[in-house]
Each structure stands twice: as structure tokens, then as C-alpha cells.
Amino acid sequence: KAGVTQTPRYLIKTRGQQVTLSCSPISGHRSVSWYQQTPGQGLQFLFEYFSETQRNKGNFPGRFSGRQFSNSRSEMNVSTLELGDSALYLCASSLDGVLNEKLFFGSGTQLSVL
Amino acid sequence: AQTVTQSQPEMSVQEAETVTLSCTYDTSESDYYLFWYKQPPSRQMILVIRQEAYKQQNATENRFSVNFQKAAKSFSLKISDSQLGDAAMYFCAYRSALNNDMRFGAGTRLTVKP
């Protein structure tokens, strides 16, 4: 089985622009969650989708949004980019989204905002 | 809110020796899950070991074991017979039984010396 695939690997944007990141989970996995990783704040939970519905959301402003498609692929969108949005964005998938379930992570998208 | 603290930013171990990484957490909940994830230079987070809070027995996975002290809210990771491939950032994580919000510690960078 292919692992979790995130595209693109690297992205450079300027302040004020918007960006869309993509995540393809492992085949058969229905839960997809997103995390932001920065040197200063560490790893922070953004949101989790299960069967096309957002189940949980972290403490991030409304500029951060996401969605999940019927094939479980997920996209994350950040509008009106700020310098502080520069980070590694990690996506993880799991089979049923059960709380003690193993998460499978992608290699992330490194976003740089200039 | 739950917080996870890893007090050792960096640790070093000689190949074949044993090392223990510390993790403490703060929560008022009685039911939760704890994880150790490893992040090598490839950036892809990999689950090392997990522990359900309701289980008294410490989890073990081959060379990896935990010392879970629920009353002390401590969850340390012991790596035995350290190998060069164990070199990575290690993150301790807490997940509430109420939602999918996973909280990570700041990480410990482990170096393995040949």
C-alpha cells in the first residue's frame, strides 16, 4: 500500500496570498488530520476530518480551513497568508479515527511565506 | 488545557547502550492515550509506542518500552540497545478520550554515537 502522500513538498508564497495543500491518505483510511510544525510552537493540531465531516478543530484562526472529499483525500487552505504561517504542514491518516489508533504521517509540505 | 512537557531538548547515547527520554503531562482527565512518535530527517512521523491510560501494564515494542506513572503524570521512553537508526527527534503526545485533539511536546533530539 502506498503511504500518505502530501503535495507539494515545498511551497513559497508571499504575504496576502492564499495556498492549498493536498493530502492523499492510505487507501481505506477514512480519517485525516492536519498539523502545523514550527520551531517556536512545535507541533499543533489544526483539524481532523472523517467521512467528509470536520470532527475536531484546533485553536487556529478562520483563515485556516480544510475539506475532505468522498475518496478521503483532503485539502487544507490558508487564506491571506502571514509570515507566521511559514511552517511544515503535516497530514496524518488512520483507518477509523479511533482515539488510540496509530496515525500514519506524510512527509509534509514546507510552506515559506515571504 | 492539556500540556505536554519534554524537559530534555537533546540527548545523546552510545550505540548499544540504553537511553531514557522524559515526558510529563498535565491533565484533569482520567481517560486518555499517550504516544511516542519519532521524526527522522525525512520529516515523516513514525509511531514508536502507545499506552492507554486505563492500562496499568507498561507498553513494550521490541527495544522500546515506557514507564507510565499515571499518578505522577509521567510517560518516559526507554530505548535499549540503541542503534544508529534510532537517531531522530522524539515527540511525546497526549490525546484526550473526548476528542481527537493531539497535544505534542516540544521534542527531544536523540543522537546515537557509534
Image (tube, coloured by chain):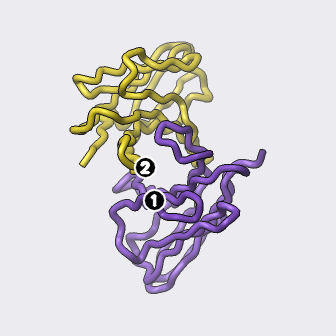
Chain colours: A purple, B yellow
Q: Nearer the viewer, residue B96 or B5?
A: B96
Residue at left 46%, top 81%?
Answer: A79
How many numbered dots are placed on residues in this image?
A: 2
Residue A112 appears in view? yes
Amino acid at dot 2: Asn
Which residue reaches farthest right?
A: A1
Q: Nearer the viewer, residue B56 or B43?
A: B56
Mark 2 — residue? Answer: B100
Q: Quadrant of residue A7?
A: bottom right
Which residue reaches farthest bottom?
A: A16
Mark 1 — residue? Answer: A55
Badge 2: how crowded within 10 Å, few (<14), some, or many (20+)?
many
Residue A9 appears in view? no
Secondary structure type for disc 1: strand
Residue at left 40%, top 39%?
Answer: B93
Q: CB under 8 Å between callouts 2 and 1?
A: yes
Left or right? Give the position of A45 relative to A34: left
Residue A9, position in %: x, y? Answer: 64, 63
